[in-house]
Amino acid sequence: MADSDGRQVDSINHSTEEDVKLQEVVQAKCEGKELTKEEKQRLRKEKKQHKKNKKDDRGPPEKEKEKEKASVLAPSKPATQSPAHKAPVPVNASASESPVAAEKPAKSKAEQRAERRARQDTERASKQGKKEGGQQSASSKPKATPNELQPVVKRLPEHIQVDDPAALKKLAKKLERQQVPLRSDYGYKVSLFSHLHQYSRKNPPTQQISIPATVIHPSIVRLGLQYSQGIIAGSNARSVALLHAFKQVIQDYSTPPNEELSRDLVNKLSPYISFLSQCRPLSASMGNAIKHIKKEISNIPSQCKEEEAKRRLQECIDSYINEKIILASEAISKYAIEKISDGDVILVYGCSSLVNHILCEAFEKQRKFRVIVVDSRPRLEGREALRRLVKKGIRCTYVLISALSYILPEVSKVFLGAHALLANGYVMSRVGTSQIALVAKAYNVPVLVCCETYKFCERVQTDSFVSNELDDPDDLIVTRNGKTHLENWQTVKSLGLLNLVYDVTPPDFVDLVITDLGMIPCTSVPVVLRVKNVDQ
Amino acid sequence: MPGADKETDLSERIESFLSELKRCGRGAGSLRDSAETARETTALLRRITAQARWGNAGELMEIIRKEGRRMTAAQPSETTVGNMVRRVLKIIREEYARSRGSSEETDQQESLHKLLTSGGSSEDNFRQHFAHLKANVIEAINELLTELEGTTDNISMQALEHIHSNEVIMTIGRSRTVEAFLKDAARKRKFHVIVAECAPFCQGHEMATSLCKEDIETTVIPDAAIFAVMSRVNKVIIGTQTVLANGGLRAVNGTHTLALAAKHHSTPLIVCAPMFKLSPQFPNEEDTFHKFVSPHEVLPFTEGEILSKVNAHCPVFDYVPPELITLFISNIGGNAPSYIYRLMSELYHPEDHELYTGK
């Protein structure tokens, strides 16, 4: 953050009084002198003003109203409404600043300044006229429009832009700034997936950072290692582990002398999040959890004492885990148990903590059913589910996914877990789920997906290619009868191994989604998202 | 006595063939190519025709039926054995009819009038003795053997008619017919192949390495990803273990899922199967259709604590209904699944569909 400030300010190089003050302040920073809190706030306000001026060159005038209102609020509050425009705007501004900085030397700087000031004056004059008249409607309209039609100028996530060298360079620079190691891709990537990362489990990113890590908190390092080695897997487990690690971070955090906790803590979390996403791309549930935490941190009032703030944040994290995950799974179990009748044969796929919980609860409530666990290579997560169910005493059958057509005529219901539910009704889940839903549909077996609402996300996707995760391709290698056919697949030029992690199931294969808000059809996901946004 | 030696030699050969059949039943690895099995069966039947003692066609057919029953009982899932036995029986009938000079061979069951008036089965008992019958039958069996040897080449010759350049083709497991088919097309065209590995035996791996040797761009995917990648696939080309009488397939497990995914994406499903795989069986109840191997492949014995409390299944074959199949490519050309019944009537006589006389 500090470096980019310096660069921006240098490139602008104005000479009005405020700019002189700004320059002084910047020079003081560069010389290493500590700025007081007030100076920092002033610096922040002026930076925003500069950004706003730059936006005049290309931004539509109505955005300025929001910016003026928003300029006093913190920039990192994506959820509240008026900064809703601000959040994408500074991103745009920073993204567009580099080309702008390149263009600058073309025209003389004095000329540009003059033009801009003239334009600002005229626009301010016209706005004065409009403001008096349309104050009420103008102020209510921008509040309404972000809710109805947010112009989605979203930034494309980095992890699906691996084939773009510019994006890779940007990421490398950002990681260098944050002192997070950059992980390199491994092995030959199938051409259809050249836009995704493919890492090897044998090269964890923790090898490249020194222990004890200076920038990254040790519990985050441990968490990253657990993610990259697959020790913690499953979206609920990953989210809960993340939140516990953040609790530890907050516990150990102490505000530096001239900083506010609400701003500084958020800045401290950014390199951690970059590190974790280098270890393994973030899941939708983790993304939602992080958004929630950042919002809570920014909402801490500045006069709150540090101990009090930390306690509040810990409580907030605990209540998030409790509400969204634990209580949600209780609610979902209650609904799901209504759907399980005696004599049922239930098919489950892989290891979903939620589905396992439902089955164990149903068994405790004396429902008579048996379970068929379907598993697939190379992860073989079904074995874990099998162990848990057998320990409970449930009668189980175990097959691989290629035997699905054989076993399906016996099945009366299919229960599936989800990694995320997308806004167009598609279910993103472990690879193979769509196949199960497809074959179940062909045999007219009802498919029920169980998913907590915190996993709902606003993305839309229609196939499993554009956004996915590629796991270590070496996992596909197997030794049978002493022969390993794919042992030297790297040396063979035209051979590729593809180990997908997720796939999307179209909503016509899913009969019902059981969430903590009730039982809804797949296509009602955007309704739930809207309800959640209004609540928050 | 030379006669006795020949007989013991013959029965030895039959016994060794039977024991080989029984042994190769473990694992769906098909340690034996089905083409090889067909060839060996036919060679053995030729030897029986040459060396066994028989006076007329009826006795020969009885001997062959008896041996055929023993062979199919040794390995019920290996249907090519039964198919070859039926082919030879049909050859004998034809040669007999030709020797008699009658033109009946063409009117076997095609005329409904004939069926009604003749009262079902043919009235002659194949009791007439013909001097040249043995030589004729042996010659016809030789022709059959030649046909068997050329099946794979005949199928691969049609490859260029079906594969264009820059295609993405998907296949599952390992089929030597499909391998030859794709390699033949790769000589002139560039395309991409995705192989589903077909757990738990993972024969897809062998297929992929073999295809790579011909510089075909290959990708190996786990079975769970079949539906996920199907949207980018242009054609699905598979082999099969048996083609059933209704046009359905008995293929490696996982093929039904593949066929359903192809149907969902409206991707054509092409089956490369030589004619000796066509069997007059229908898909019966699950108990006779399926073959299972040790569940150790699925849940290894190292998972001891839960093994005793869990049922694990490892079926080898899948049934694919004919409405999911677009085209059959065989050594006699391409056919729709609805035409299979007709091809069957040309290959086998209806009385031979059941090798068990009476029941």
Image: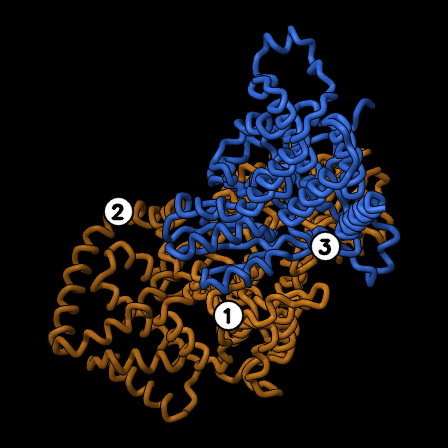
Q: Which of marks 2 and 3 is in front?
A: 3
Separation (CA) of disc 3 from disc 1: 32 Å
* SS label for mark 3: helix
Q: Which is nearer the N-term, disc 2 or disc 3?
A: 2
At x 65% / y 31%, what residue is drawn?
Answer: B132
Give the letter of the chain under mark 3: A
Q: Which is nearer the N-term, disc 3 or disc 1?
A: 3
Judging by the rendered image, the residue that carries numbered circle 2 is A134
Q: Position of residue A389 (x, y in %)?
A: 80, 51
Answer with left or right where residue A245 lies relative to residue B273: right
Q: What residue type is labelled 3?
A: Gly
Q: Chain A is drawn in which colour?
A: orange
* SS label for mark 1: loop
Q: Position of residue B165 (x, y in %)?
A: 36, 52
Q: Marks 3 and 1: same chain?
A: yes
Judging by the rendered image, the residue that carries numbered circle 1 is A492
Q: Which of A7 and A464 is in front in this view?
A: A464
Judging by the rendered image, the residue that carries numbered circle 3 is A382
Quarter that holds the N terminus of chain A: bottom left
Q: What residue type is labelled 2?
A: Gly
**In the rendered image, is residue A455 in sight?**
no
Q: Nearer the viewer, residue A138 or B304?
A: B304
Answer with left or right where residue A337 lies relative to residue A525: right
Q: Which of marks 2 and 1 is in front?
A: 1
Task: Point out which mark residue A463 bears.
Answer: none
Q: Which of A428 and A236 is in front in this view?
A: A428
Q: Colour of chain B?
A: blue
Separation (CA) of disc 2 from disc 1: 70 Å
